[in-house]
Image (spheres, helix red, strand yellow):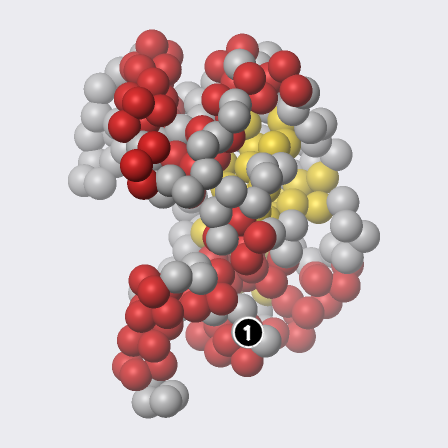
């Protein structure tokens, strides 16, 4: 199996290698990214998710505030705390979840979305993880080991992106299971791969099926004269 991706044909070969349906994937625009949930990322750098020391009680308080205040903005009311966390994660809140997808094409898009910004991208893949239990869905802060959560289709983005999540017992710890694979996408390959993915209907508009996603997608096509 490839360790690096330098062109579309190598990416296509990786898709064939990982086509058994047992993998989940995550694409990142920087090869220096560390797999760690935002809720536990403490840093004083600009744009960091957490400036103060991590406290589990603050993570719980944030969820309770979301549950109290978010209902006017939702067409569907989540039925478990983990479902609430999935909504929060999709809309930018810092949680103990990490976003993954069952589609390597979708992961490839997120890896190459900022093509041209400099530096290599990376795609992660993992298989063999357990699924969270029904009891853990109700009490996600009680997990002892990471697990996969496949949410109901509570927002249009979830089916569009074939979204799944990993839920982490300790968000301050990097995720590095034994089965984890990491494929670097060279900076020179990112633009070409992104253009071919667009031809395959994997783009900002299809993955974010709302007016914001459509507008960003048309803005990208306008920028490159692809109208």
Q: Residue at x 57, y 33 (%)?
A: 166
Q: Residue at x 32, y 68 (%)?
A: 216
- Residue 197 position by quadrant: bottom right
Does residue 94 appear left or right of residue 162 in this picture? left
Does residue 36 appear left or right of residue 218 in this picture? right
Which quarter of the figure is the N terminus placed in?
bottom right
Q: Is residue 57 above or below residue 24?
A: above
Which quarter of the figure is the C terminus placed in?
bottom left
Q: Residue at x 59, y 76 (%)?
A: 200
Q: Which residue is mark 1?
A: 201
Q: Is residue 4 above or below residue 180?
A: below
Does residue 176 appear left or right of residue 51 in this picture? right
Mark 1 nearby-residue class (10 Å; few <14, some 14–19, many ≥20): few
Number of numbered discs: 1
Q: Position of residue 40 (x, y in %)?
A: 37, 24
Does residue 90 appear left or right of residue 117 in this picture? right
Q: Position of residue 2 (x, y in %)?
A: 69, 58
Q: Is residue 189 visible?
A: no
Q: Position of residue 144 (x, y in %)?
A: 59, 12
Q: Is residue 19 above or below residue 188?
A: above
- Residue 11 position by quadrant: bottom right
Q: Is residue 163 above or below residue 198?
A: above
Q: Of all residues shown, which one is farthest toward the right? A: 20
Q: Residue at x 42, y 21 (%)?
A: 172
Q: Is residue 12 visible?
A: yes
Could you tell me which secondary element the residue under label 1 belongs to? loop
């Amino acid at each position: 199996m490839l360790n690096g991706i330098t062109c579309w044909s190598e990416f296509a070969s990786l898709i064939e290698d990982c086509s058994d349906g047992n993998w989940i994937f995550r694409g990142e625009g920087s090869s220096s990214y560390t797999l760690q949930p935002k809720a536990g990322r403490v840093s004083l750098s600009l744009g960091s998710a957490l400036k103060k020391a991590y406290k589990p009680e603050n993570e719980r308080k944030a969820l309770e505030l979301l549950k109290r205040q978010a209902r006017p903005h939702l067409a569907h009311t989540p039925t478990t705390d983990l479902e609430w966390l999935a909504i929060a994660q999709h809309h930018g809140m810092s949680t103990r979840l990490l976003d993954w997808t069952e589609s390597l094409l979708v992961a490839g898009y997120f890896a190459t979305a900022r093509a041209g910004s400099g530096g290599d991208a990376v795609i992660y893949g993992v298989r063999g993880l357990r699924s969270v239990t029904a009891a853990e869905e109700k009490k996600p802060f009680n997990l002892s080991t990471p697990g996969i959560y496949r949410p109901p289709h509570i927002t249009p983005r979830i089916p569009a992106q074939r979204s799944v999540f990993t839920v982490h017992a300790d968000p301050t710890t990097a995720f590095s299971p034994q089965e984890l694979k990491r494929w670097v996408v060279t900076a020179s390959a990112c633009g070409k791969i992104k253009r071919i993915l667009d031809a395959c209907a994997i783009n900002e508009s299809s993955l974010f099926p709302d007016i914001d996603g459509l507008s960003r997608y048309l803005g990208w096509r306008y920028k490159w004269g692809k109208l």
